[in-house]
Image (cartoon, rainbow, N blue to C red):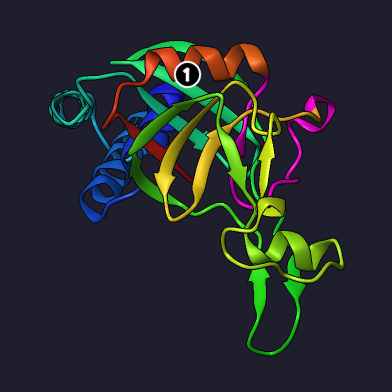
Amino acid sequence: MNKRIVKTLMIVSLSISGLLLVLNLQSVTIALATIGNEPKVNDSTFQVMKSNAEKELTSLDKKLKANMPETNYLVVNSTMNEFYLYKGDELIKKDMCSTGSYVLLKKSEKEKWMFKTPKGEFRILNKTKDPVWKKPDWAFVEEGLPVPSYNHPSRFEYGVLGDYSLSLGDGYLIHGTLFQRFLGLPVTHGCIRLNDENLELVYKSMPMGAKVYIF
């Protein structure tokens, strides 16, 4: 029962309707766990309440399955720095990842960056093999270097994102890392980092448009 609720939280707590569904599931589970300890409820009343609670739980479970993505999807726990790759309700892979560090980089009052991973529901917008990183302004500020022009050759770095990248939009990527010993820690500038094996699995398992849930 608890496992079902945890999975539900990961999948549907990113929308109002999903949140209501989770709250309903939690209330039903609490009812089933505690109703038998209520001294004022006789056996027949208890059985009716238990039956109603189980019916509601079954109904909510059907709604959850009806809203489950048809393609593979990824769930990212940015607090625990873990990812879960699913096919329907089947867990394909669970492992460590790295997400945003929440470090604030400040150049001036007008130019500052908070390195956090966004939360919500996203889709895979683009997939790239052998990606090239185009360094944003903050990468130069972080290194104490002058910021070059938009297409200056110094902005382009090869081999630092791993063999693949998957775009979530607004510059946020799922990609590899040269520093795999840091996986499991909040050390990124907002992107989601995976090791080489997991990156290849996610890249090959997630089609264009596949959903990514980050919480």
Along the line of sight, the residue nearer the viewer: 87 or 110: 110
Q: Magenta-highlighted stretch: main secondary structure?
A: loop
Q: Amino acid at mark 1?
A: Val
Up the image or down, 168 lies above or below 204; here it is: below
Residue 69 position by quadrant: top left
Residue 145 point in image, percent of width and height = 84, 67
Instruction: State the SS at label 1.
Output: helix
Using the rendered view, name the quadrant where residue 162 is placed: top right
Residue at 87% in and 68% down:
144
Residue 88 magenta-drawn? no
> Residue 153: x and y, percent?
67, 51
- Left/right placement of residue 189 relative to residue 203 reads right
Q: In this view of the protein, which residue sits in the foreground, 127 or 86?
A: 127
Please report the residue visible at 65 percent of the width from the left and 70 percent of the height from the top.
113
Q: Is residue 159 left or right of residue 131?
A: right
Residue 38 seen in this snapshot: no
How many numbered badges does the structure rendering display?
1
Residue 194 location, x and y as percent?
63, 26
Which residue is rendered at x = 72% and y = 70% of the image? 147
Instruction: Read off the residue under disc 1.
Output: 202
Give the percent coordinates (x, y) of residue 205: 39, 14
Give yes or no for residue 190 being in the magenta stretch: yes
Vertical position of residue 141 compared to residue 129: above or below: below
Q: Nearer the viewer, residue 171 or 145?
A: 145
Name the quadrant of the N terminus. top left
* x 78%, y 28%: residue: 178
Magenta region, residue range: 180-195
